[in-house]
């Protein structure tokens, strides 16, 4: 068992945000170690269903110091992303401790102490990059444990052909729910219901063959007040009035939900056509289960052979960081993308903010922000150590302000 290893920086998580930050730190000569609970890099991606594709254009799928993925697919496959991240990690001059689970995090003076199943690590800077969608969320519906048929999360959705001939209920029509419904629309299930509380903000994957996300930079520069009406207009013009098919609009616009709540747009690639053709039926919110039925808010009961829950994910950070006051009421970081936390100097989070340009771009921005701040911090400390004795007191006083300045 390894104990009391001390480095300049520790990154928790060997996903895209963690790897990008480690790359930027090493580029500045900063000693960094990665702790990864899984036995391989890109664990969150490996856990997603094999048919998953990115909903961002490949031009935005790159990390610092590496060109865009060489792949002809406009929207990259899950396995392409895993291969890219594995190669990226292989090119880092950074030790990665696999199968190392963080058990507790404490502040010990100016040092962060990280207790793991493989001993204790210490660092001046702790970067948390475990992912916004680390823990599958399944609501505790009344009677759900009584239901006699399979209930799975969208993360466990595998080959769509497995559902041919079956009655399938998809709960939720957000990003992951629509992804599943897109796949099912190209297969032969006996019947598909989609249970919704609020309709999604839904956009086409392409407009006249042009990938919509390729224009993401345009949306970034538009005034925030304009985004909701623009997206609502696009949805109405392209799809018509989806209320006729049981799919109502959320009371909060799509742009606002993405920027404030991190709820990404649903991207249609067959779902809406199947809905209009009657191959998919939109029904009301799921409110409970019996042994052989799913109960809806409308009072109706349906009898699916399998239930697929598109009910989202959680960050799973509360056990480790709640005591530090670093999280909001939903359990997400107050400073989600590399911003300094003056209440917790040397604690950084990356990969927890959703942007129009996607997680790869956000990872690069956060990595640059964190590495630049840590390099400046270490430079100031080096200046203090090399300063003449008669000026050292003043410099130490200035250095003590580091946490406040960050």
Image (cartoon, rainbow, N blue to C red):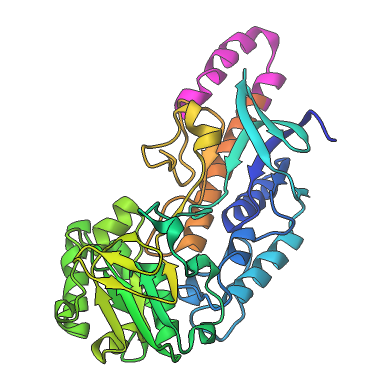
The answer to whether one can see residue 179 in this image is yes
Viewer-proximal residue, 192 or 374?
192
Look at the image and say whether residue 399 sits in the magenta stretch.
yes
Viewer-proximal residue, 231 or 400?
231
Whether residue 224 sits left or right of residue 98 in the image: it is left
The answer to whether one can see residue 211 in this image is no
Residue, x 46% and y 25% (percent of image)?
Answer: 343
Viewer-proximal residue, 362 or 373?
362
Prevailing secondary structure class for the magenta stretch in the rendered image: helix
Residue, x 49% and y 79% (percent of image)?
Answer: 75
Look at the image and say whether residue 401 sits in the magenta stretch.
yes
Residue 154 picture location, percent across and down? 48, 68
Q: Is residue 388 above or below residue 228?
A: above
What residue range appears in magenta?
382-406
Residue, x 64% and y 55% (percent of image)?
Answer: 19
Residue, x 19% and y 68% (percent of image)?
Answer: 249
Whether residue 289 sits left or right of residue 188 in the image: it is left
Viewer-proximal residue, 312 or 23?
312
Residue 183 picture location, percent across and down? 45, 83
Residue 199 picture location, percent across and down? 24, 68
Which residue occupies the extreme front position in the image?
291
């Amino acid at each position: 068992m390894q104990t009391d290893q001390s480095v300049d920086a520790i990154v928790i998580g060997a996903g895209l945000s963690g790897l990008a930050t480690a790359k930027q730190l090493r580029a500045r000569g900063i000693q960094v170690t990665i702790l990864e609970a899984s036995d391989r890099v890109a664990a969150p991606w490996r856990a997603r269903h094999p048919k998953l594709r990115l909903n961002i254009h490949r031009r935005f799928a790159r990390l610092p110091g590496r060109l865009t993925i060489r792949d002809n697919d406009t929207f990259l496959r899950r396995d392409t992303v895993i291969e890219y991240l594995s190669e990226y990690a292989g090119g880092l001059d950074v030790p990665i401790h696999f199968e190392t689970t963080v058990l507790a995090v404490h502040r010990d003076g100016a040092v962060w102490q990280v207790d793991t199943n493989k001993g204790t690590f210490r660092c001046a800077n702790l970067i948390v990059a475990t992912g916004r969608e680390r823990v599958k969320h399944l609501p505790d519906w009344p009677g759900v444990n009584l239901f006699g048929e399979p209930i799975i999360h969208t993360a466990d959705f595998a080959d769509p052909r497995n559902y041919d001939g079956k009655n399938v209920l998809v709960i939720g029509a957000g990003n992951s729910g629509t992804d599943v419904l897109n796949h099912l629309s190209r297969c032969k299930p006996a019947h598909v219901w989609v249970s919704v509380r609020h309709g999604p903000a839904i956009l086409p994957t392409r407009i006249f063959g042009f990938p919509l996300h390729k224009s993401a930079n345009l949306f970034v520069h538009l005034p925030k007040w304009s985004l909701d009406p623009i997206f609502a207009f696009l949805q109405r013009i392209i799809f018509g009035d989806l209320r006729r098919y049981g799919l109502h609009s959320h009371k909060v616009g799509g742009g606002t939900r993405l920027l404030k709540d991190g709820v990404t747009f649903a991207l249609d690639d067959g779902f809406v056509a199947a809905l209009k053709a009657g191959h998919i039926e939109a029904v009301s919110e799921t409110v409970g289960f019996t042994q052989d039925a799913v109960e809806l808010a409308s009072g109706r009961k349906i009898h699916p052979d399998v239930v697929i829950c598109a009910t989202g994910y959680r960050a799973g950070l509360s056990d480790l960081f709640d005591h530090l006051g670093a999280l909001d009421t939903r359990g997400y970081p107050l400073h989600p993308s590399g911003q300094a936390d003056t209440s917790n100097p040397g604690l950084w989070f990356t990969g927890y903010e959703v942007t129009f340009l996607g997680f790869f771009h956000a990872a690069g921005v956060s990595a640059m922000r964190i590495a630049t701040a840590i390099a400046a911090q270490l430079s100031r400390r080096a200046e203090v150590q090399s300063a003449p004795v008669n000026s050292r007191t003043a410099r130490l006083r200035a250095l003590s302000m580091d946490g406040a300045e960050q």
